[in-house]
Image (spheres, rainbow, N blue to C red):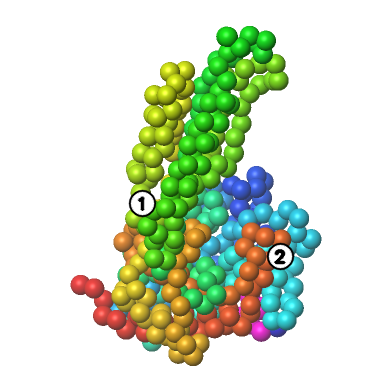
Amino acid sequence: MTPTANLLAALVGINSVNPSLIPGAAGEAEIARFVKRWLDERAIPTEMHDAAPNRPSVIARVPGNGEGRSLLLNAHLDTVGIDGMSDPFHARIEDGRMYGRGAYDMKAGLAACMLALADLRPAELAGDVLLAAVADEEHASLGVQDVLARIRVDAAIVTEPTSLRVCIAHKGFSWHEIVTAGRAAHGSQPECGIDAIAHMGRVLNRLEALQAELRQRPPHRLLGHGSLHASFISGGQELSSYPATCTLQLERRTLPTEDVASVEREIEELLNVLAAEDPQFQAQHHTTLVRPPFGVSEDEAIVQTLLREASIVLGTTPATFGASFWMDAAFLAAAGIPTVAFGPHGAGAHALDEWVDLHSVDQCREILVRTIRSFSMTPARK
């Protein structure tokens, strides 16, 4: 196998399923130790920090001479679960593709970062280049948040798989819980009971109408429309009783033009309308998680540098696009770091059949090296 395939096969072979998603799963400790050891063996200074107990991230640095801009490469160590996969940690190669859990999302991007750092020499860099191989991206992004408290950089590249296109925007999301209140009573006494599940049905109808209204709003140039959907619902205690409560959890996907305050107002307004229509209607709403959307100007130096260097390697200028899924790029951008996402080609994120094109990993590596060298020569901000 090639050096790229060897490294990626080793990464895929390490179980790094996120334990916040799958209780008792292996987590990032073993793969973090592997990444640190691999970089240490190549004389690349590294640090390892726990964002939570036994949930480490690795920070590596190739120093420049301090006269140019610094650049962060970001990749995550964790993967989703493996239910239904026959041999998830065996890296299988067929027709130039490597199969296995995490091969695409996103150990290929991590391998490209590690190899790119090994290709560099400190004497050729004016600015530092860092790698943050982080924990917990697939759940709460504890790793990148911890790393951001420890470093300062001028720009960042997130190597999530983009099929060698340049991602300059992605949607955010927020999670919300709505609880409708009823009154428990025997099923034979309708005059005594209030059906919390029936009241939640009204909420669902209003949410469906709100989703239709979102589709009528002006779309984002790259991301289209915001959206929402009901994710989980529960309520009731037995067949012969009126349900006292019903709980709905929903997700709202957001655009760079939206924020959580506007989303919360939308939900509160529809609940207020239902309460005005029926004095017996009672509902409480609260937001359980917020992840912001991401956007960067195409005029930013890191975007222009990446486009230029990628066009040399690929023979054509890659497309810029917006992704529907969320990435750690949003946290980096929120910290004031101009950020872009760029990674290899493949398919099957979170699916049973996950693969990455190995040639695209080598192309990604080469483009990263060229971009690092070029961006490093940009004079540092004073």
Left or right position of 188 against 265: right
Q: Position of residue 179 (x, y in %)?
A: 51, 28
Q: Position of residue 286 (x, y in %)?
A: 43, 34
Residue drawn 37% across the image and 81% down it: 305
Q: Quadrant of residue 308?
A: bottom left
Question: CA gap, disc 1 to disc 2?
Answer: 34 Å
For mark 2, what is the residue? 353
Looking at the image, is mark 1 or mark 2 nearer the viewer? 1
Magenta run includes residue 299: no
Q: Position of residue 333 (x, y in %)?
A: 36, 61
**Can residue 303 be seen?**
yes
Left or right position of 303 against 199: left
Q: Secondary structure at mark 1?
A: loop
Of 49 and 101, the residue lying toward us: 101
Of 202 and 263, the residue lying toward us: 202
**Magenta segment range?**
2-7
Q: Residue furthest left?
A: 382
Q: Secondary structure at mark 2?
A: loop
For mark 1, what is the residue? 258
> In the image, what residue type sits under mark 2?
Asp
Of 233 and 94, the residue lying toward us: 233
Of 379 and 358, the residue lying toward us: 358
**Can residue 40 be seen?**
no
Image quadrant in which the N terminus is located: bottom right
Q: Position of residue 270 (x, y in %)?
A: 41, 34
The main secondary structure of the magenta stretch is helix
> In the image, what residue type sits under mark 1?
Glu
Residue drawn 74% across the image and 73% down it: 92
